[in-house]
Image: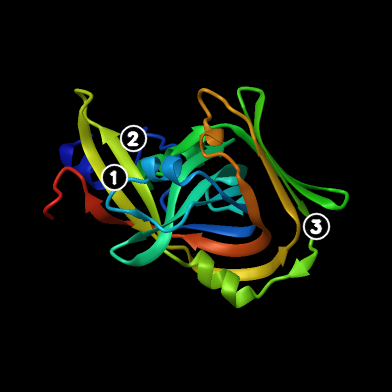
Amino acid sequence: MTEDEIRRNAFAMPYVNSAYPQGPYRFTDREFLIITYRTDPELLEKIIPAPLKMTEAVVKFEFINMPDSTGFGHYCESGQVIPVTLDGVAGAYVHTMYLNDHPPIAAGRELWGFPKKLGEPELRVHKDTLVGTLDYSDVRVATGTMGFKHTKLDAEAVKKSMAAPNFLLKIIPHVDGTSRICELVQYSLTDIVIKGAWGGPGALELSPHALAPVAALPVLEVLSAVHILADLTLPYGTVAYDYLQPSK
């Protein structure tokens, strides 16, 4: 290989057989269970990275089933998302994510900076209940439940909320262990098609775990539970803030 060939073809690791294909990535029949809950404001404020600002002491715990995703196949995901603002613009900060498939873990971390770790999330319907679970190292750390399709939600309102900006803290180390990239990345989902959206009674239980500390933001009160079925595209992101060159 010549230097020009490497520069022209380099996209992802490993060079000769990358862990994932190039995006953007299209998701078909992506299914969400989102349980919104109130938590301790002091604990929440400690983990939101500046210049993002907390709006209220609220966390959204998500369980997601992705049966048809470009380049990734079928996998599941779970994690915590926090409503925030950046320069007065409302969005959401992705705090934790656990997946059961390597390619989207690698792509999500390397391209955007999604805070992804290997876990075992699942989303399924059990009789009259939509059930989301998250296991880490064979230990159950989260269980979310919702009454199945009790009420129908406004599709346009759901679509608008899903199109809001999302923020990620991307960190790539240098070969000497220092930070080579330390950025706040922004992205927004596009081409969203809502196939169904429902509400219902919800409950969420979080258990302490040293390496999957979802319970560090405790559940004080469940505010809502939402079930969504949608098609959408995850495009590339942009750098909203560079911690290594803050003046730019």
Position of the C terminus by quadrant: bottom left
The residues bearing labels 3 and 2 have C-alpha atoms spaced at a distance of 45 Å
State the image quarter where residue 19 is shown. Answer: top left
**Secondary element at tag 1:** helix
Q: Position of residue 96 (x, y in %)?
A: 48, 40
Q: Are marks 1 and 2 in contact (CB under 8 Å)?
A: yes
Report the residue marked by disc 2.
Answer: 15
Task: Please tell me which of labels 1 and 3 falls first in the chain.
Answer: 1
Task: Please tell me which of labels 1 and 2 falls first in the chain.
Answer: 1
- Please, what is the three-letter code of the amino acid marked with disc 2? Tyr
10 Å neighbourhood of mark 1: few (<14), some, or many (≥20)? Answer: few
- Please, what is the three-letter code of the amino acid marked with disc 3? Phe
Q: Are marks 3 and 2 in contact (CB under 8 Å)?
A: no
- The circle drawn on residue 9 is 1
Q: Position of residue 134 (x, y in %)?
A: 64, 36
Report the residue marked by disc 3.
Answer: 148
Task: Please tell me which of labels 3 and 2 falls first in the chain.
Answer: 2
